[in-house]
Structures are given as C-alpha cells and as structure tokens.
Amino acid sequence: MQKRPILFPHLVAYFLQVVAKQWQHSEPTWIPICKRGALVATIFLLLGCNNQRPRSTPIVKEPAILSFVPHDITAFTQGLVIDGDVWLESTGRYGHSELREVERQSGKVLRSVTLPENLFGEGLALFAGNLYQLTWREGLCFVYDRETFEVVGHFRYEGEGWGLTNCDQWLYMSNGSDTMQVRDPASFRIIRTIDVHDHQGPVTQLNELAWIEGEIWANIFETKTIARINPETGHVIGYLTFDHLPLPGHEHPKQDVFNGIAYDPKDQSIWVTGKKWSHLYQIQWPL
Ligand SMILES: [Ca+2]
C-alpha cells in the first residue's frame, strides 16, 4: 500500500529553507561568515532528509505457474539466460562448473565448456554477441563468443561474483551484499553502485539477476523470493514469493536452493528454477 505523504515535515522543511536563505543574504551579525556557511550547509542537508519521500512498502505477490520443462538435476544453476530456443546456463561448484547451451523444450545439453577445477561458476549475461560468466571467489569474469563458445577475453574484479545481468548499455553485478555494481561491458570498470533497500532498510543476499522490462529481478539467496528492484534508486518495488515451488512430484533429495531467472523478450515470458532442480517454471506475468 502506498503511504500518504505527511504534510508536517514539508512545512518544517519550508521554514528552514526560508531561514537558511535569510542567513545567507543578511548583513554580517553575530555569526562569522565561515560558520554561517556551515550552518546553511547543515540546514540544506537536513532539508535533503526532510524532503525525502516516504519509502513505499513493496507489494508481495505469489505468481501462478503456467508451464514447466525439464532441467538437469546435476546443474547447480548460478546464471540463466534465454536466447531463442536455448537456455544459456552457468553452473557452479568446484570441479563441476560449466557454461552450457541447453535445448529449452527437452533440457538436452547441446554443448558445454568446463571450467578449471579451481573455479566456481556464477552469474551469466549475454551482451552484444558475447557471454560474460562470473566466478564466485576467484575474481575472474570470462568472456566467450556466443556463437563459438570460445573464450575471447577475461576481466579481473575485486570481491565476490554472484549474479550478472545487463540492459542495453551496462552490466549489473551482485556479490551477496545489498550493493549492486553497474559495470562497463568494454572494460568491466564500475560506473556506479546501487544500494538496494526496501521500506525497512538494506536488502542483502542478492543473487541471480535478470533485467526485465526496466527492472532488475534478484533472487534472495536461501529464500524462494525474488526482489523487483528499481535500477535507478535501488528501491524494491515488490517481492515475488515462490513457496509453492517446486510443484508436487518435482522435489528430490539432492535439490538445492531457488535460483535462476530468465526473461524471453520474444514472448515476454519469465522462467525460474533452482540449483539442481528437476524443472524450470514459466510464471504468470504480468500479474
Ligand atoms: Ca539470469
């Protein structure tokens, strides 16, 4: 529910603004110029706080499941992208990490690249004909040619790599904290960071990411929840919960946590899965 704006702080802000302007332009009196400047700055800082709109409470919804297709129960899904008739998938765990191209309807692995045993595959993004694959604690992002699956470059980065997605200009990267990094695909340089928060404060454990219709969707690690994030402000617009997944009969003892979001721009369908889950699910969207 949208909170109604409160009038009182705005009146206080207006009053302080008038006082600040008076101080700035009045003749020197009992306040030295330098101190007056500091006071004016402090008042404007306070105004900045007072003028902030109340953070709206995210809407929580549980989308219905429209359809499902098979998923390899050995695939420890860390990154998921749709490209036409195939899934492009990054899988994790040391000694088992791969980049995969998988037939969407059957779940058949069409081809794969195996990472060295000391690397743990993480987020995946498809940008301008290249695939970017993160590693967890190794600070290494591989760049592959989408068509040939050959490594055409790599980047180094500080800290951990979790999720990765992109808009038509930038890459967006999560690292398990509440801060996402916006990176230049050409250099992997950090352009800016996004502090993700809801009405209660920072939202941490951001994992797999997907850019969907101007929003960033992020799996919250170890939950069956996706946060819908405004990429400009970092504010969580809404939460989607998936406590009804996997569907009855799809659960098995070796499955791991909910992870993996992919968007198909051709038909605007959205798909989710989990690490070592037996199926991928198309969710109802829009709700
Ligand atoms: Ca994804």
Image (cartoon, grey):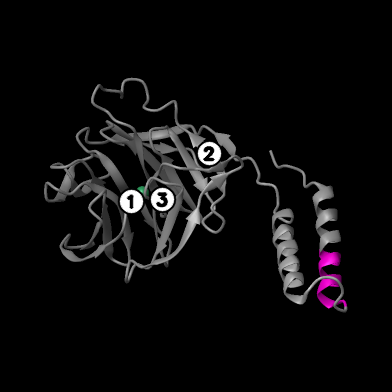
Quadrant housing the C terminus: top right
| Disc 2, SS | strand
- Quadrant in the picture for residue 280: top left
- The residue indicated by pointer 1 is 82
| Disc 1, SS | strand
Q: For the point 22% across and 32% down, which residue is it?
A: 73
Asked if residue 262 shows in the view, the reply is no
Query: Is the CB of mark 3 within 8 Å of ligand 1?
Result: yes
| Disc 3, SS | strand
Type of amino acid under label 1: Ile
Type of amino acid under label 3: Ala
What number is the disc on residue 256? none
Label 3 to label 1, Cα distance in Å? 10 Å
Q: Nearer the viewer, mark 1 or mark 2?
A: 2
Label 3 to label 2, Cα distance in Å? 14 Å
Between 31 and 162, the residue placed more toward the observer is 31
Q: For the point 36% across and 68% down, which residue is it?
A: 189
Quadrant housing the N terminus: top right
Whole-percent x and y of residue 250?
31, 24
Whole-percent x and y of residue 149?
17, 59
Q: Earlier in the sequence, mark 3 or mark 1?
A: 1
- The residue indicated by pointer 2 is 239
User: Overall secondary structure of the magenta stretch?
Assistant: helix
Q: Earlier in the sequence, mark 3 or mark 2?
A: 3
Q: For mark 3, does the 10 Å Cα neighbourhood hold few (<14), some (14 to 19), or many (20 or more) residues?
A: many
- The residue indicated by pointer 3 is 210
Q: Which residues are magenta?
A: 17-26
